[in-house]
Every structure is written in structure tokens, then in C-alpha cells.
Amino acid sequence: MEPYVERAVERGIDEIGFTEHVYYFEQTRHLWSMPYHLERCVYDIESYVTAVVEAKRRGYPVKLGIEVDYEHAREEETAAALAPYPWDYVLG
């Protein structure tokens, strides 16, 4: 994360957001039916969130984001899966 922040500062950017696709995380596997999504659910969302939150705690100008794909009739399950985390923004 540090190289990204350093490069942003060099270019005069005062804040950056880290945004990952929600289907990359094991914790969301139950939401998906498409093979494309299921094949990519291999990472731990806790590690991602912890890394960005720790960077914020250390004073880096970062935001925690997530990009959420729509899965029909899974809105409540999706919201419940994301609720435990301190997102600064959610993209749909």
C-alpha cells in the first residue's frame, strides 16, 4: 500500500481509495452462482480490510472501498455480508 500512497503524494493527490471487487473474497462465496465469480473467491476479506484500516491508523490518506456486483434476490444477504466492515464507500 505504501508505494501507492507515496506515488499519489508525488503526483499531488491528497487521498486515494482502495476498491476491490466483492467476489474476490471467500466470505462472499455463498452469494454467487456464476462460475466467473465462484472461481475468484479465494482471498480473505479480513486481510484486505485490516490492511487499509491499519494504513488509515498510521495516518495514510486512504479510504476503504468495495465494488459490489448485483446478484438478483441476494440484496439482503449481500448487505449482511458487508455490514461488519467500516467501508468508506461502496460502488455498485
Image (cartoon, rainbow, N blue to C red):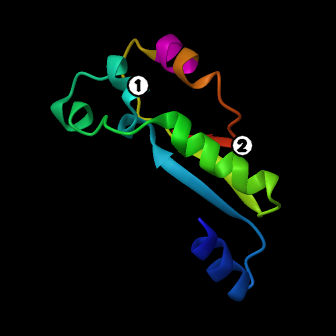
Query: Where residue 16 appears, x then y in whole percent?
Result: 67, 64
In which quarter of the view is residue 90 placed?
A: top right
Answer with mark 1 or mark 2, whichever residue precedes in sequence: 1
Residue type indicated by callout 2: Asp
Query: Where residue 83 appears, x then y in whole percent?
Result: 63, 21
Residue type indicated by callout 1: Thr
Residue at 26% x, 35% y is 37
Q: Is residue 78 magenta?
A: yes
| Residue sitting nearer the eye, 75 or 55 | 55
Q: Is residue 37 left or right of residue 15?
A: left
In which quarter of the view is residue 34 placed?
A: top left
- Above or below — where is 88 with respect to 28? below
Alpha carbon separation for disc pair 1 and 2: 19 Å
Q: How many marks?
A: 2
- Which mark is in front, 1 or 2? 1
Classified by dominant secondary structure, the portion drawn in magenta counts as helix
What residue does disc 1 label? 28
What is the span of residues highlighted in magenta in the rendered image?
75-79
Label 1 SS: helix
- Above or below — where is 29 with respect to 23? above
The quadrant of the picture occupied by the N terminus is bottom right
Query: Where residue 18 appears, x then y in whole percent?
Result: 58, 55
Q: Residues within 10 Å of mark 2 (few under 14, many from 20)?
A: few
Residue at 75% x, 84% y is 12
In the rendered structure, find residue 89 and report the number of the disc placed on it: none
What residue does disc 2 label? 88
Q: Is residue 35 left or right of residue 72?
A: left
Query: Where residue 80 appears, x then y in whole percent?
Result: 56, 15
| Residue sitting nearer the eye, 90 or 86 | 86
